[in-house]
Image: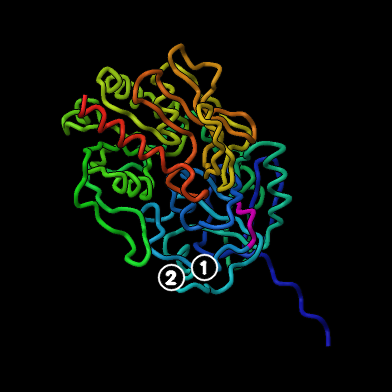
Amino acid sequence: MAASAPSKPTACLALADGTVFYGTGFGATGDTVAELCFNTAMTGYQEIMTDPSYAGQIVTFTFPHIGNTGVTPEDDESGDPVAAGMVVKWDPTLASNWRAAEELKSWLTRTGRIAIGGVDTRRLTRAIRQQGAPHAALAHDPDGNFDVEALVAKAREWPGLEGMDLAKDVSCAQSYRWDEMRWAWPDGYGRQEVPAHKVVAVDYGAKRNILRCLASAGCDVTVLPATATAEEVLAHKPDGVFLSNGPGDPAATGEYAVPMIQDILKTDLPVFGICLGHQMLALALGAKTVKMNHGHHGANHPVKEHSTGKVEITSMNHGFAVDAQTLPEGVEETHVSLFDGSNCGIRISGRPVYSVQHHPEASPGPQDSFYLFERFAEAMAARKTA
């Protein structure tokens, strides 16, 4: 009997340099264009896909077992996936986990996100490392009909993340209160019923677990949109101000965020920033940010704190970095990446104003960096005492 003909590819990933990968499509159909990055985390694919910091990016997962634990609403970092698409080595298998509420494939279909399986992700990751994060077009067609030239043209025409303000797109539309704390066995997510400090969190694309960590550190959290003014922040009479993570070019977001932060810095309020919030604080203090070759995306990044010599295992997700050489006098570098020496933290000398590039709320250590939230709470308590 004659061998059956090979199945036709149902997905296509076209890079701006003309390189094309074919595979099996799943999730939504259609096409999307974004920057292509890779993430080395072995767990947390749902948290990654719903992290607002991934707006404008297609994520290549270097770990092959994606989808085997399904998805659950408890693990969403925002309401729906924000990453533009997903690239994986193996087609996802059926979920095998007691917490799973839905299969990855159906979740992606329902939420309108395109994915491709069967790709040589090692080859793709090497290309990204060597040549930088490329612009890419990802298409899924069950019939396998692709206009490759048109897809490559779309990738080439996409303007890229430099100069792009995406924080407005993923920020909340109006203010809201947050009191949910971190997940704990066996009761799950508790509620902060006796907060000691009032915090305003400026939402540039805040992950839910950051807000949970603030609540667990004793904070009554009010979340404001990215475009909030200093007057709007101070109207809540906060004990401290938090600057959240988020996507896009920090210099573009800084056009409206930096003046607000500079006005907040005229007060004596403690300020704490993470990821894009870290970059916003640096820009407000007069430093500059730069686009990285392929960024840092993973859950195993070693970061050293200068003052203690402690090395923390951290989660990272950023394509831009603060240029430590541009930090002004009176601003110290507090943390540094042991992978490439890039800046991972700053503080104003003698003031409770600091920020980090990595994500302490993601807990890959697992608790290596939670002290940063406790430090924020201690600074607010000290201000009240003073």
Q: Kindly tell me whether residue 174 is visible in this rendering.
A: no
Pick the front one: 128 or 177: 177
**Image quarter for residue 119?**
bottom right
Q: State which region is magenta.
A: 60-64
Q: Kindly tell me whether residue 79 is visible in this rendering.
A: yes
Residue 41, placed above or below residue 383:
below
Q: Give the residue number, with chain letter if any, for mark 2.
A: 99
Residue appearing at x 71%, y 47% in the figure: 19
**Image quarter for residue 240?**
top left
Amino acid type assigned to the residue bearing label 2 in the image: Arg
Q: How many marks?
A: 2
Is 240 left, or right, of 43 in this rendering? left
Which badge, 2 or 1, comes first in the chain's sequence? 1
**Image quarter for residue 90?**
bottom right
Pick the front one: 120 or 31: 120
Is 259 left, or right, of 293 in this rendering? left
Secondary structure type for disc 1: loop
Q: CA distance from mark 2 to mark 1?
A: 8 Å
Residue 210, placed above or below residue 44:
above
- Residue 386 is tagged as none
Residue appearing at x 27%, y 23% in the figure: 264
Q: Give the residue number, with chain letter if any, for mark 1.
A: 69
Pick the front one: 306 or 44: 306
Is 91 left, or right, of 53 in this rendering? right
Residue appearing at x 37%, y 52% in the figure: 78
Measured as percent of width and height from the top left, residue 179 is found at 24, 50
Secondary structure type for disc 2: loop
Label 1: few (<14), some or many (≥20) within 10 Å?
many
